[in-house]
Structures are given as C-alpha cells and as structure tokens.
Image (cartoon, rainbow, N blue to C red):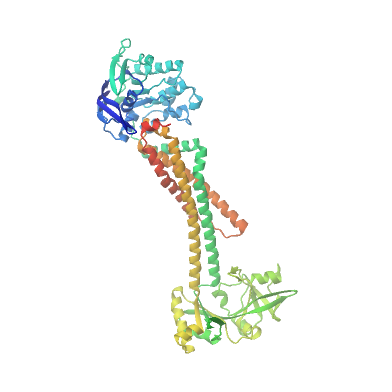
Amino acid sequence: MIQITNLSKTYVMGDTPVKALDGVTLTIEKGEFVAIMGPSGSGKSTLMHILGLLDVPDEGSYKLLGEEVSHLSEDELALLRSRTIGFIFQQFNLLARRSALQNVALPLIYSNFQASDDHAQELLGQVGLGNRLDHKPSELSGGQQQRVAIARSLINDPPLVFADEPTGNLDSASEEEIIQILTRLNEAGITVVIVTHEPEIGARTKRIIRMRDGKIQSDERVEHHPLPGPLPSRERGKESRKFSSGSFFKEMAEHFRQAFGSIVSNKIRSILSMLGILIGVAAVIAMLALGAGAKSSVETQLASLGSNLLVLRPGAARTQGVSLGAAAVSRLTLEDARDVKQNVESVSRVSPSVTGRGQVVYLDKNWSTQIQGVGPDYASMRASEPSSGRFFDEEENQKRARVAVIGKTIVRELFGTNNPLGEYFKINKVLFQVIGVLPEKGANGFRDQDDVIVIPLNTAMRRLLGKDYVDSIDIEVKDASLLDTAQNEIQELVQRRYRLDPNQQQKSFEVRNMADIQAALSETSKTLSWLLASIATISLVVGGIGIMNIMLVSVTERTREIGLRKALGAKRRDILMQFLIEAMVVSVTGGLIGVSLGWTVTYLMSKLSGWAAIVSSGSIILAFVFSAGIGIVFGLWPAKKASQLNPIQALRHE
C-alpha cells in the first residue's frame, strides 16, 4: 500500500535548517496496524504528514497504491487524499458551529463519493453516537468528539486511515474506547497508521516503527498480535469504491450552501461586513434619485421656456463701461416682427411682446406685478396654454380687448380659493376680465414665473403701457436643426433693414438662442448627477474595502478550518470559491437591504424637505450590480489568500 524510498524533508527555522526526515525508507502493506513512535522532534509527525499527502518531501520516492505521488500538484494530492485517506486528528478539528452529522459529512463535498444520505448517520451509530446527530462539538465530551472525527475519517470508505495522537487529549476510559474502535476498523480490513508517544497504545498495534532525529531506529512486529489472515469478505479496493466526477452546478450549489452556513454561523461578522455595502448602496440610490429629481426640475424649467426659440432684443450700449440698458440704441417695431416672419423661411411663428409693471386691484386686495403684452401665438410658443379657461385670440388682440390670463401667484394673492374665471379686476385703474389661468411654472432664478399677467399685445401697447415699440420678439423655428441658420438669417435681415455694419449690428440688436440656455442648464444638471453619483460610488468602494478587511480577518480567524478542509480533500478552487461566494453573498444581501433603505430615505427626503427625488429602476439595477461586483473584486484577494494556505501550517495555526 505504501512504499517510500530515501525520503528527506528539511525545514528552515529562522536561519537554521532542520532536517526533519533523513533518508527514510519504509513499506506498509495492506491491512497492517502500524504505530509510529518517537520523542518530540523525531520526525514522526512530518512522516505522517507526507504519508497522508498533506506535505511533500524534498527528496525521495513515495508510492501510494503503486502510484508515484511525490511530485503531484497540490490539487492532485487533494483529490487523491479525499478518495484514499481518512484523518483522525489529536485536536479533533471539528467545525465548532456545525453539528456532528454535518462534520461527518464534510469530506463528501470534496470527494464526490457516491454515498447515501444515511451513510453519515450509520457511521455515527457505529461509533456509538446515533443519538447525538444534531449536537455541536461544544455539547460533546472529548471522547465523543474524537469518535465524531473517526466517523468523519470513514465517510469516503478509505482503504487507509491516519491517526495523529488520537488519544492524546482523552481520559483513560475514552482512550480505551478509541483504540478499540481503531482495532475493529483494522480487523475489517482498513490499514491504520497511528502516530503516538504512548507505549501502551503502540502495544495494541501489530507493528511499531520507532524514529529519532529523522531516521527510523527500529521496525518491529508485536508478536502477540499476528497479522490478520485474509481480508473480510467485503474487499476494500479501488474497484469497490464509487466516485462521481461531480457536476459544476452541484459543486456550486454546495459552495453556496457552505457559504450561507458560514455567514449564518457568524452573524455579527456578517452584519459588519455588509454594513458598508448597505450604506453605500443606499447612498447611491438616494443620490441618483436626487440627481434625477434635479434633472426633472430642470427639464420642467426648460419646457416652460418653449422649444426651438430665438429671441430678438434691442442691444444695450455701454458708455465708459456703464450699460445704458436695452433699447438705448435702437428699438424694435411690429413691422420688424412681420418682416422676420415673411422673409425668413425657417421661421414658423413670431410673437412680439412688451413688458411693464402694474398695480392690480380686486375688491380690497391689491398686488404689484409684471404685465406682459403678447401675441396670440405666445401660449403655444412658450408652453403657456392655460390650465383653466382660455387664451385670447387674434380678434381680441386687434380690438384691444381688456382680457387677461393670470398666473397662479396672482390667483393666490387676489382671489384666494375663489374661482377667478370671469371676474373683473383693475390694472393701473383699467378694468380687465380674467379669461384664463396660466400653468404653474415655479421660480426661475430670483423671479417668480407665476407672478405675471398676460394681456393682448395691442391692448398693452395702446391702452395700458403707452408704447409704440416692442421690447422683444419671440421667434419659433420650424426645426431645432435650423436654429443656427435662422439666427444668421435674422441677423442679416436686421442688418439690411437698419443699414448697419457688423459692429453696429452687435450693439444695436442681439439674437438670443434659447437652445444654448437649455444646453447649459442640461449640462449643469448632468454634472450635478455625476457629482452625486461619484460621492455615492466612493461610499460603495469604502464599503468594499470594509468587506475585504473583514474577510482578511475572517481568513486569519478560520485558518485552522481552511487547513482542515484541505486535509479532507478541498482543492484550491474549492476554498477560493467558498470565500469568494461568502463575500459576494454578503455584498449582494447588503445591496438588497441597501436598495430598500435607499428608497425609504429618498421617500422621506422628498416628503419632509419637498425636494424632487425620483428613484429609477436603472439606479436600483446599477447599485445592485455594483454591490455584487464589489463583493467579487474585494473578496477575491482574501479568497485567493485562503486558497494558497499550506494545509499543515494552517492546521497548526493558533
């Protein structure tokens, strides 16, 4: 079964090399019961670790079941170890938060041994623990824990069992129970190798190998325990032991189950791990919602300005750096408006306007507000179709009708909760009738856009404000792509009408492109959204670093568990996937809770502060995917570190 030739192993302690094994040659046949004995530092544990495929020699040959294994890779050793060898450790090495049944079944995860679900229960019954299946190690005595470890070593039906000081931590009664179990296993055909320093234990075996200073001193057979005859009828060989290759989905399901078990078993650590991600995701949701709300507000403001608009205004001259104000050089007329509409093909509609201030009176209430005289097309051009009532028409404009469309602020200040439609009030002592109420537009900078009264242009010019010129001309272009062309054509038209050179034209008139203002506002909104999202992303990254730190601490805390899993057959990929899935599950769970928290915070901010906040499905998906990515990225290093641990060093970790 085992054949080693000239096996050597040297460790470096500080700067001093220590030769643990020095040219050891040994053969162990199938069915033997062997004790390896010697004082501390003799090399017996190192020999068992190499024989158990937990370590590799520096030199020499090791054949297990006729196969050379001294040069196999770590994963190849793990696979062979899981299917060939059972381990019984002095410190029991049971997972503290798993039941006896779960501890016994642990090696099945890595070996894919085709055993029934009742196999672990059967083994616990054979070692006298059939009534302790759900007990955790802390609820078992030392002898009972060692019997669980023995049952675990047999779960894959191995032909070879190694026991490292299996009775070292037990009382005499428990010691006798364990040695009897090992004897019965050997009588059933299993090859048993014990490392012990107790002569009475060695005397119960069939062969004693004594070591000192890394060499075999003696190899004797115990005469009163002759080697067994033929093996029992149940032949223990490769041909009788069935393993499956294991499907990817089954492996992943088992990794997820192990990860969930670890997370649930360490609730405080898991909660602390997901706290950073939870806050980060909630911040992303809230920040993006605020950004979306700000964008929506800007879009509402833009809609109130109208679309595809140009505004022609008189220029403002400067004298010694002081602005003389609009119309100080030239003035626009109604003829200018008609000329623009008739001669610029890309223009669809125009609406001249005049503005002024007026004192309005209704019953015992009065208010000072802005008066705007406009053409009938103003409503559709400026997105000002009345929310109730109607806008005036061209006939009323030509007849200088005393009708008015008022803003929401005027309604509130003059009429309160009463319906203003059809009511009469005075503007600068001139009687007007309310025929409509403008849609609410809110504040624009320092100006309340709802604090306005709109009346027909001719009425404003001839009856109220006494103007024979217009203050500006709103010009609607047929298509947004024609704005620049229309702007140039209007400038050329004004230049021809007033016989201006280019320098004079710039001082006399200006054409404002509302699309430029819209683009600037949109860019500001986008910048704000990116700024808020960046702040929230930083929160997520900080949360990810927190996960990485706690996972690194977890790796340190669970070093012995990692060593145990590797000793039971876990490959590097198995350890990597388990820790990576743990990090991902923590981050995804934190992300889901963070989504709920973010939505709640957004709702409360919107309700309590009145801020516009919109939670979009895109922000939720982004935050969730990002949180999962954080778990993968920041969990990868701790997971990789865990997978690279040496099983022997990990098992010895304090």
Residue drawn at point x = 46 percent, y = 73 percent: 480
Report how many numbered discs are placed on residues in the image: 0
Depicted 149 relative to depicted 308: above or below:
above
Q: Horizontally, is 128 left or right of 18 in the view?
A: right
Q: Residue furthest top?
A: 224
Image quadrant holding the C terminus, namely: top left
Q: Residue furthest front?
A: 15
Q: Quadrant of residue 150?
A: top left
Whether residue 408 is visible, yes or no, is: yes
Whether residue 32 is visible, yes or no, is: no
Residue 78, horizontal then vertical, whole percent: 33, 32
Q: Horizontally, is 455 left or right of 255 in the view?
A: right
Image quadrant holding the N terminus, namely: top left
Q: Which sits in the foreground, 186 or 422?
A: 186
Q: Residue furthest right?
A: 364
Q: Which sits in the foreground, 41 or 75?
A: 41
Depicted 253 relative to depicted 296: above or below:
above
Residue drawn at point x = 47 percent, y = 36 percent: 261
Q: Quadrant of residue 636?
A: top left
Q: Horizontally, is 164 left or right of 357 in the view?
A: left
Depicted 505 relative to depicted 628: above or below:
below
Q: Which sits in the foreground, 93 or 605?
A: 93
Residue 594, horizontal then vertical, whole percent: 52, 48
Residue 269, horizontal then vertical, whole percent: 50, 39
Residue 51, horizontal then vertical, whole percent: 31, 26
Depicted 172 relative to depicted 276: above or below:
above
Q: Horizontally, is 384 left or right of 72 in the view?
A: right
Q: Quadrant of residue 12?
A: top left
